[in-house]
Image (cartoon, helix red, strand yellow):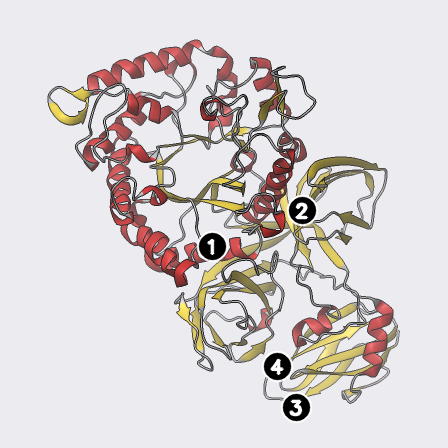
Amino acid sequence: MKKNSLIAALWFLSGWYHSVCAQQDTVDINLNVKHIVGGVSEFDRSKFIIIHDDLTGNEWDSQEQQRSFLEDYDVYFGRNNGGIVWEWNNTREDPANAGWPDPAHLQTRADNAIANYAGNTFVHQFEARYDNMMIGGQEFMFPHGQATNQGGLVYGGFEETAEFYAQYLSRFFGSGSATGQPRPRMLEVINEPFVKANQLGTTNAELSRYHNVVAQRVKELNPNILVGGYTAAYPQFEAADFNHWRGNWKLFIDIAGENMDFFSFHIYDVLSQPGDISRETQRKGSNMEAIMDMINHYSYLKLGEVRPWSISEYGWFCPGCDGGYDQKEDWYQLRSYNAMMLQLMERQDQILNAIPFMILKALWAHPPGAEYNTYGPRLLREIGELPGEPAHAGWMYTDLLMYFRFWAGVKGTRIDTKANDIDILSDAYVEGKNLYLILCNLNHESREVNLKFFDPDSNPVSGITVNHLYGIDDVAKMDTTEYTGAISKVTIDDQATMILRYTFENDIVINEENTEASYFADKYFQEISAGQSETFAFTGVQKGDFGEAVLRLGLGRDHGKSLKPSLTVNGSRINVPEDWRGYDQKNRDRFFGVIEIPVPYHLLQASNEVMITFNDNGGHITSMVLQVFNFTKDLERSVPADGGSIVLALESLNDRSQLFPNPAREVLQVENDQSGDIRYFIVNPLGEVSKDGFLRSGMNNIDIGSLPAGVYFLVIEEGQNLRTKKFIKNQ
């Protein structure tokens, strides 16, 4: 995991490397500050805690097992790619219209389906878990001269096949109970069609046009159903110098984007060489952010808005790992599920559903002649699949059950959290007296994380339950630890996730807000030329009195090329961090990721200009998104530090900063003799940043009235150098 030893925020903006400072990870938790993005602030379990199954799934050992799983872990239904396929294969030709489905035969089968569901009264109790359900077709439903297996119908073309989709959704469902199975909310037209275009004898462009025809007809008969695609299998946009992007996602948005209610794609960490996990190429982290930002940015430019998403599969994938159940693969799945889910939870306003990919038993995938199923991610396996077990002795849960155990109970209103290390993902939800704090470590080594609570009500903690999901020798483990009072830090294993459930003595009061919005630049996907400045404009930006901002710079560049350009926002130079989410991507063909750049909030205007210049040729700026967080009050942010080392370092810096009076009581006067804004920090003797901000050109007054009396350092960034001055704050 790449890391720069930075002296807290002092070095963060200047980019200095300082080996004497050992960085500490800290997560700030503002208990009373609601975090809202796109109007959404509640954790919707039906979007995330999902099983890839249907109400009428037939791979459970018993009804009691199904009931216990759904209710004990509060799980929702997500996706079925088989039901519509079964009916497609049984459809007959309309005697009066060659190549068209027979509506009378469809109605007969629909009546039988509704009657069967009405009689299956056990599953009616779970209908409330069906609200975000999606069904999808398979590639052979694209009309290419293939006859249906049972009906013998050869569809005549796009319109004829679209008629089947529309009639199926209209006739085979009801509103629950005796009226029939509830109608699904979403339709994915075809699962992963572009990778199968050759075998279908067609092109990506034709498949995109097919999506248009199906969507239009489905919505004529079923106006409340959302239709989407293209269910991308491998969103490797950077491949072939971004020809993959041009010939896949961009092409699909250009042709079918207007008719898609949502976009769907699959995200996987991939091990292409079984047996050597060090060769794994990870999408979690910065690469995943770059994929999502590029889709959104182009969607905004082309369609005038971003479309909602269905992440209809995500997790870990090893295409060559067939050969029986391997417990290690469960751990690889779990670590990918949790990290990716936390990244997706940052976009809850855009997510329709996000489905961790696992099948129940996958009986349909059992290879002929094999003693046991060799399918990968399964929730249930046969006893006997591991050495030393009695053969074919029944079924049991795999370690993937830990995912549902781990997330059981998490709910509530999202509150403000922020980690000072981009490789520590954090999120938190409040319900009544309970707080669910979620931490995920993207680092490949364990990390100690300080927990810093900002609680204006000083609400005492009565108990904490910590669930830690991690791996030992690549086998998943979940430990539960109980505490009777507050704790100041935790240690998270490498690539592990932790959920801390706090119980406070009183209900948690939320009375402030952090409202997040994203703005897209006026252009995207720009080639990089050495020394040539590229200017991006952001308009319509709204800001308040308090807040933060992050510029999300998407980059696709060959390894060895610079990822640290010169950058200005509205004429003020901004430092570009040399760190990003996740691993270094060195085993990918090239770097494709997002660099998240803090931008001083006071620099933001309604219209903003960002100028970027690289010192070397090659690659692309793939996206440019400005995240703005508007606060109803000024929020404190922690900066980690090794106090003694920082104080020694400060003493050794260039001591020529001019300030007066010294000692001071209420105000420090500091002159900035440069033409632009410069950053300053006030640091206490423990190495903690007590105050920071920007000095405008000329004389500045810094309010220090709220600081405790004592010795401080004023540290000012001056180009690539720092200068400092010790001063005394009096009572």
User: What residue would you read off at disc 2?
Assistant: 510
What residue is rendered at 60% in x and 17% in y?
65
User: What residue would you read off at disc 3?
Assistant: 673
How far separated are the C-alphas under marks 1 and 4? 34 Å
Residue flagged by tag 3: what amino acid is it? Asp
2 or 3: tag closer to the N-terminus: 2
Q: Quadrant of the C terminus?
A: bottom right
1 or 2: tag closer to the N-terminus: 1
User: What residue would you read off at disc 4?
Assistant: 677
Evaluate if marks 1 and 2 touch, with contact meaning CB atoms under 8 Å apart.
no
* Image vertical order of residue 12 relative to residue 84, above or below: below
User: What residue would you read off at disc 1?
Assistant: 291
Q: Quadrant of the N terminus?
A: bottom right
Instruction: Tell me if mark 2 has few (under 14), some (14-19) or many (20+) residues whose alpha carbon lies within 10 angstroms of its own.
Output: some
Residue 580 on image: x %, y %: 60, 61
4 or 2: tag closer to the N-terminus: 2
What residue is rendered at 84% in x and 84% in y?
662
Residue flagged by tag 1: what amino acid is it? Ile
| Depth check, front residue: 430 or 94 | 94
Instruction: Tell me if mark 4 has few (under 14), some (14-19) or many (20+) residues whose alpha carbon lies within 10 angstroms of its own.
Output: some
| Depth check, front residue: 577 or 241 | 241
Instruction: Tell me if mark 3 has few (under 14), some (14-19) or many (20+) residues whose alpha carbon lies within 10 angstroms of its own.
Output: few
Q: Is residue 561 left or right of residue 161?
A: right
Q: Mark 3: which secondary structure?
A: loop
3 or 1: tag closer to the N-terminus: 1
Q: Mark 2: which secondary structure?
A: loop
Residue flagged by tag 4: what amino acid is it? Asp
Instruction: From the image, state whether disc 4 or disc 2 is nearer to you.
Output: 4
What residue is rendered at 36% in x and 42% in y?
229
1 or 4: tag closer to the N-terminus: 1
